[in-house]
Amino acid sequence: MSGTGKARAVGVNHVALEVGDIDEALAFYGRLFAFELRGRSETMAFIDLGDQFIALQKGRKQGPDDGRHFGLVVEDKEAVRKAMTEAGVEPLPGRFLDFRDPWGNRIEIIGYENIQFTKAPHVLRGMGLDRLSKNAAAVKELTEKGMKPG
């Protein structure tokens, strides 16, 4: 525990997205990403991200998200851009690669090499992604925080 007596947040275990239909959601996301299911039911599906996951939950009722979003880290951002084009998914305006799924969930696509977010080597190995690395800017940011990649 930190010196303030409060617990520190150390990461995100999962993100839950509300969708209209689980099968349609799995088909939509399957056109954009290669993934494995961690589990599913009639009203839920869990897309595996190694030591994290995305939960798809049936029952979205609210309108489309504008600013609210989450950043999904990928091994190859340009492959996602290409898959979006092939699937007819329009990127949102702006300098980032954002899109909305058919239910209005907003997702920002971020390349692993460009950011501080780092999977532990054993998790990357287990995911078959142990070749991923960081660019110089990301290494510098991590090093300045005392987290230089090994």
Image (cartoon, rainbow, N blue to C red):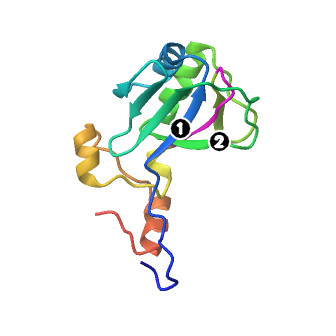
Q: How far apart, in angstroms, are the residues tagged by discs 1 and 2? A: 11 Å
Q: Which of 41 and 30 lies nearest the eye of the viewer?
A: 41
Q: Which residue is mark 2?
A: 69
Helix, strand or loop at disc 2? loop
Q: Is residue 105 magenta?
A: yes
Residue 93 sits above or below residue 12 on the image: above
Figure check: 41 above or below 7: above
Question: Image point 27% across, 48% down: which residue?
Answer: 123
Of the residues tagged 1 and 2, which is closer to the observer?
A: 1
Please provide the residue range marked out in magenta.
102-110
Q: Residue at x 68, y 28 (%)?
A: 91
**Residue 103 placement, left or right of 120:** right
Q: Position of residue 56 (x, y in %)?
A: 51, 29
Residue 138 vs residue 129: left or right?
A: right
What is the secondary structure assignment of the residue under circle 1?
strand
| Residue type marked 2 | His
Check disc 1 and report the residue beneath it.
Answer: 16
Marks 1,2: beta carbons within 8 A:
no
Q: Residue 84 appears in which quarter of the rendering?
A: top right
**Circle nearer the N terminus (1, 2):** 1
Q: Is residue 52 magenta?
A: no
Residue type at mark 1: give it: Ala
Label 1: how many residues lie within 10 Å, few (<14), some (14-19) or many (20+)? few
In the rendered view, tell whether residue 21 sits above or below residue 120. above
